[in-house]
Amino acid sequence: MNYLSHSFIKPESIERREYQLSIAASALQENSMVVLPTGLGKTAIALIVTASRLLNAGGKVVMVAPTKPLVEQHYRFFSQYLRVNGAEENGNNADLFTMFTGATPSKKRIQQWQNATCIFATPQVIKNDCLAGRYRLNDVSLLIVDECHRAVGNYAYVFIAQDYFRQAENPLLLAMTASPGSNREKVQEICENLMVGRVESRTDTDPDVKPYIHEREISYLSVPLPPKLEQIVKTLNQLLASRLSMLSGLGYTVPSPEKLSMRAMNAISAQVQAHIKEREPSGFTGASIHAECMKLRHAISLAETQGSEPLRHYLFKLLAEAADPKASKASIRLSQDPEFQELAYQAQRWQEELLQKPEYIVKIVQEQITAFPDSRIIVFATFRDTVNLIVKKLTDAGIESHRFVGQSTRDTEKGLSQKEQLATLARFREGAFKVLVSTSVGEEGLDVPSTDLVIFYETVPSEIRSIQRKGRTGRHGAGNIIVLVTKGTADETYRWISHSREKSMQKGISSLKKVPYSSPYVPAEKKQQMSINDFGCEPERKIHADEYKPEKTIIADDRETSSAVVEWLHKNESISLEITRLEYGDYAIGNRMLVERKTARDFVDTLVERDLLGQLKRMADACEHPVLIIEGTDIYAQRNIAPNAIRGALAAISVQFGVSVFMVTGPEETAEMLYVLMNREQGEPSGRPSMHHHKSYHSEREQLEYVLSAFPGIGPHQARSLLEHFGTLSAVISASEEELRSVEGIGQKISGVIHSLSHKKY
């Protein structure tokens, strides 16, 4: 293994596989997508490409993955097997590997970026840092995109790839996935978004990978639908049929309840939007009934595939929504239906889980652990309520199990923090418990070597999710997969949909390498020819990093980083974009202008359900030139609101508050409008955007707060605390640092700033 040892990979650390070396050699020639079945070592290929790239091109390597546990897994693998520039002998190899998280302070991430050679992160962190200008990607010689099937639409992968090729002096991208999808157009979109020029794919039947494929036995276990649950489904279908009948009476084309697929629901929605666009009253009524159909369809799916306990929680959630003063007409009307009320009343008396799936899982797990005591078992379920139910059933049976869910908190249930996710996975790998019960957060990429059984609580129609779930076993040895299917329900339909799509995807993967892809960043005549003994010859520099620093600045609120507007501003090289938290507005231009951005729907929703006028008035009071930008083609077609009510609101905003209102079609036009406003506002020497902008002060108290909050690092809250404690401005300025620190919220840094500036000579 001389090649590997010379490439900074620790000798004998990974098994030599010719197909991995062959794919790595190709991936070093141009931007590539690697499509390999799970367990065949995509990460090992990334390691080989990284070692060669660092050896021949230097620079940094950035690897992005969609979840923190997957990022941590890659970080552990690379830091264990990769040796960078002999640093291991000097004892500082670990310093050259770093893992970025949103919880890491931005200043620390900047420092880590400067010091590290290999950076592992979730894409949103990298995107936010690039938008904020914390670092540039110009010296990144390799960008690795794991689970690249996500690189569609507005996902952060797309932005990072575009920014990378715009900035990098010597770019190369390696994308990896086990399941790009069965839709060829989507695969093409992924390739275009990531500038991929070559697709390297293998299937289970290819001769060079077949020796490394571990046997995976897949079995489908049929579960009967209990009579009580069958009656519940019948009631829900009757409710659904009555709503479809209402839509039909309004002139909409609708299918029968048993043929109401998601595609059919989308077709009805398209009809509804067409009616709304024509200002027909039936459009708004149809939208409300369509919302009821969506809720009932989801309830039926829960009853058939999840059982009575998740259904009970959902019914109670619908009743709670209807009791809210801001409830939609759909929620209120559904909750007032006598049949629905009777069903909710019955749900209160359900004493036990009606569907037998949880009992089946307990029995399967018990048999597996009895036969193979060292087993690791993963159970996948779509909903958190189901995850909690399975964990409870297993615990009651004396089997220790733990849930693995996302970070977000939903209703009263807390998610798992990143730290808790990593700790749970570590304990599972170590054998502290046998069963991990997971939502979709555990589907992608996670490698637990001894997982020999995966259980699907329900079938999933997505071929990508199905393949990802199955890939959690059979990675390092034989594995079993058991899928629970409820008879005569959507479970059976989804099983065949998923099976058909998986077969289609396998055919598509086989044909991918036969189709040439062209990358705009790697012209065919400039591709480097490489051999297995000559990896990493540095290609010509194709895109030069622009070091120009524009003087004109726009400040964007940090909550706007997910919008396409910020991305458009970031791409405009004549704008210096800053990201921070703004007290008022979404954007600040110059020291006199604040801009609030609303979509047409958000404008109307905020007008009805929240204090839009109060929000805009406060912004108008905080600057000289307040601006409102509304995105959307028709503000009057969003909800069933009288057009004169919207016109009255716009009049108040413009005339009473003095806010300039601009209507645009979408995010790109918003960005262009901000650019024009910036040129107009900063064409005169009005200075960079000020974070301390106020126009009017209604009391002496506010004036005192304003003066004190002009000190760097002091916001309105600290200013009020200091003035309430000391009484006057002069007392604050005369106080010692120790006296200042006695006020809650004032630390050493702020006290030092106040004392230093107050006593510094001009």
Image (tube, grey):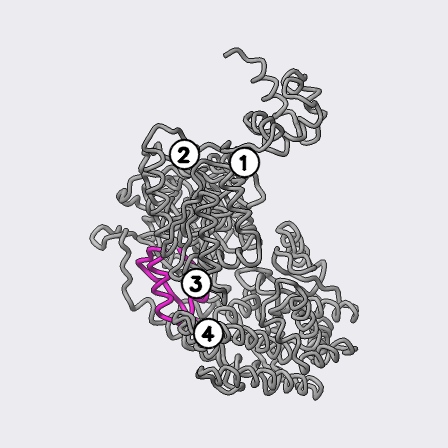
Q: In which quadrant of the rendered view does residue 372 lie?
A: bottom right
* Camera-side residue of 124 and 590: 590
Tell me which numbered mark, 2 or 3, is placed earlier along the sequence: 2
Q: Residue at x 36, y 57 (%)?
A: 665
In this view, 131 is above or below 742: below
Tell me which numbered mark, 3 or 4, is placed earlier along the sequence: 4
Q: Which mark is residue 636?
A: 3
The CA distance from mark 3 to mark 1 is 47 Å
Q: Which residue is mark 1?
A: 108
Tell me which numbered mark, 3 or 1, is placed earlier along the sequence: 1
* Camera-side residue of 520 and 355: 355
Q: Residue furthest left?
A: 525
Tag in front: 4 or 2? 4
Q: State whether residue 735 appears in this view.
A: yes
In this view, 13 is above or below 397: above
The CA distance from mark 1 to mark 2 is 29 Å
Residue 540's x, y, as percent?
Answer: 26, 43
Q: State whether residue 364 appears in this view.
A: no
Q: Amino acid at mark 4?
A: Pro
Tell me which numbered mark, 4 or 1, is placed earlier along the sequence: 1
Q: Which residue is mark 2?
A: 590
Tell me which numbered mark, 4 or 2, is placed earlier along the sequence: 4
Q: Which residue is mark 4?
A: 281
Tag in front: 2 or 3? 3
In this view, 256 is above or below 704: below
The CA distance from mark 3 to mark 4 is 12 Å
Q: Circle 1: is it few (<14), some (14-19), or many (20+) Cα within 10 Å? A: few
Residue 570's x, y, as percent?
Answer: 38, 44
Element type where label 4 sits in the image: helix
